């Protein structure tokens, strides 16, 4: 669903694009000859919320090749299908601090440093289902289409250009093959990988794809579960430490959003639980990141406090009221509210524990609680049993939970 005209989030995006539009430094990638033909002035950004609303500004329909932005999505498909233990036999998860095409293999294990650099990404593509390059690419494309929520085409010109100049990537594949970490023949992996990099997307697609990580693996627009919650969390973690080539550490300090960039000029950024952002601007800095894409995300993050480690101030107390009723043998009622994550559970239990049994029964009223985190549910639901009963046989703790938030399934 696209947001309506007059949408304030769209205005926020437009205002940032206006502020970065004049930057013409950097250069379009030309090591893949066909990439040099792109219009360098294109500039677009889209934000997709976890509710499935998409806010768009600038050239959001302009298509470009996904390139390395495909890497986290293919890693996600691999860990979703094979599990983390199997995938990490083939690739490490450590930042390399090196350029995207570095020969970055662990000496002892032969594993590429991480799945966000080419060596690791080619290995991930090699792990896709199927025995041929076509079959592996079909699995990649089908997966990426589920993240984007639409059919995607391959830019055949970029593919041919990349396939005819991709010897360094072939060399990386041979090295991983000889180290025993590549999951297929070299040609199968590299041809599928070149096609993967040549998938055509726009900034809107990248926003929805990133938002699918933000929801824990469900495409917020199509509502389809694409990968498991675990796979979404693991992938977002790898994007946090390794997503922006050898600029990842600096990026995390300045912008603070797990992200992945590609030499086609795209960046996909995730704010877990909240939204995904896609940007497109083709001129790249020396490290291969889109100059205006980086500037857009940096400004957005600063202006709107989007850094994932932003301190938002003391949270609202989860205890809305505490009343004592002397009638009927004495009862203390604690009305709880909002979301009970770990720290809220800690507050409730620590503040209220001294009241248990002190004045009759302590009633924990969860009627106004919207959610109890899975990890905190057990403690609450076990309370009445562990606390035992009063002299008159009534429980020391009574839980009122008409909506069953303590029993809600995980997720
Ligand atoms: N297809 C590109 C390559 O392998 C992807 C590089 C990138 O976007 O970082 O050279």
Image (tube, helix red, strand yellow):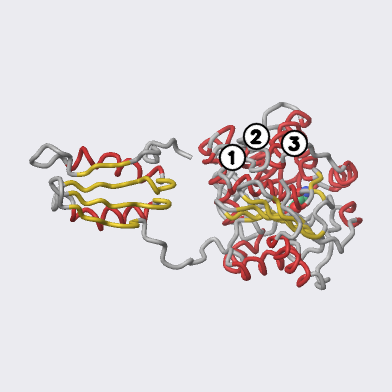
Left or right of residue 389: residue 371: right
Is the CB atom of the residue marked by disc 1 within 8 angstroms of ligand 1's nearest atom?
A: no
- Secondary structure at numbered mark 2: loop
Q: Is residue 255 above or below residue 150?
A: below
| x then y, percent, for residue 92 | 56, 47
Assess whether mark 1 and mark 2 are in contact (beta carbons under 8 angstroms): yes
Residue annotated with mark 3? 141
Give the numbered dot on residue 158: none
Q: Nearer the viewer, residue 11 or 363?
A: 363
Count residues near mark 2 (Cα–Cα under 10 Å), then give few for <14, some for 14-19, many for 20+. many
Residue at mark 1: 90
Kindly report which numbered mark, 2 or 3, lies closer to the viewer in this rendering: 3
Frontmost of labels 2 and 1 is 2
Residue 130 seen in the current view: yes
Closer to the camera in the image, 406 or 260: 406
| Residue 121 point in image, percent of width and height | 68, 45
**Can you say which quadrant of the picture contains the N terminus?**
top right
Which of disc 1 and disc 3 is earlier in sequence? 1
> Disc 2 and disc 1: Cα gap in Å?
9 Å
Q: How many marks?
A: 3
Mark positioned earlier in the residue sequence (2 or 1): 1
Q: Which residue is mark 2?
A: 127
In space, the residues marked 3 and 1 are separated at their CA atoms by 21 Å
Residue 29: % across, % down: 83, 59
Q: Marks 2/3: CA distance?
A: 14 Å
**Which badge, 2 or 3, comes first in the chain's sequence?**
2
Q: Give me the residue at 65% from left, 49% from top.
A: 210
Residue 144: image x %, image y %? 71, 39
């Amino acid at each position: 669903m696209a947001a309506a005209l007059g949408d304030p989030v769209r205005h926020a995006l437009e205002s940032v694009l206006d502020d970065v539009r004049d930057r013409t430094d950097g250069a379009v990638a030309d090591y893949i000859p066909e990439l040099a033909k792109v219009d360098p002035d294109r500039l677009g950004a889209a934000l997709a919320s976890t509710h499935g609303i998409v806010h768009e500004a600038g050239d959001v329909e302009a298509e470009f090749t996904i390139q390395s932005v495909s890497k986290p999505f293919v890693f996600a498909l691999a860990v979703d299908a094979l599990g983390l233990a199997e995938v990490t036999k083939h690739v490490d998860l450590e930042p390399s601090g090196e350029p995207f095409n570095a020969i970055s293999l662990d000496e002892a294990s032969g594993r590429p440093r991480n799945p966000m650099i080419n060596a690791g990404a080619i290995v991930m593509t090699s792990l896709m289902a199927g025995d041929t390059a076509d079959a592996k690419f079909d699995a990649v494309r089908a997966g990426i289409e589920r993240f984007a929520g639409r059919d995607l085409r391959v830019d055949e010109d970029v593919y041919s250009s990349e396939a005819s100049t991709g010897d360094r990537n072939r060399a990386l594949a041979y090295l991983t093959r000889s180290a025993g970490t590549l999951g297929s023949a070299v040609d199968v992996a590299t041809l599928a990988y070149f096609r993967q990099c040549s998938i055509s997307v726009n900034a809107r697609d990248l926003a929805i794809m990133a938002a699918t990580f933000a929801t824990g693996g469900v495409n917020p627009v199509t509502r389809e579960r694409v990968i498991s919650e675990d796979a979404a969390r693991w992938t977002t973690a790898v994007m946090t430490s390794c997503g922006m080539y050898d600029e990842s550490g600096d990026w995390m300090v300045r912008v603070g959003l797990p992200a992945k960039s590609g030499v086609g000029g795209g960046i996909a950024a995730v704010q877990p639980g909240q939204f995904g952002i896609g940007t497109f601007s083709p001129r790249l800095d020396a490290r291969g990141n889109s100059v205006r894409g980086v500037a857009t995300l940096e400004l957005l993050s600063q202006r709107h406090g989007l850094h994932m480690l932003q301190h938002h101030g003391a949270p609202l107390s989860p205890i809305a009221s505490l009343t004592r009723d002397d009638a009927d043998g004495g009862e203390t009622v604690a009305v709880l509210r909002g979301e009970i994550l770990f720290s809220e559970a800690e507050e409730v239990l620590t503040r209220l524990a001294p009241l248990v049994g002190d004045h009759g029964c302590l009633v924990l009223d969860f009627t106004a609680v919207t959610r109890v985190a899975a990890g905190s549910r057990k403690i609450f639901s076990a309370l009445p049993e562990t606390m035992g009963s009063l002299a008159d046989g009534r429980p020391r703790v009574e839980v009122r939970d008409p909506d069953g938030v303590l029993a809600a399934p995980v997720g």
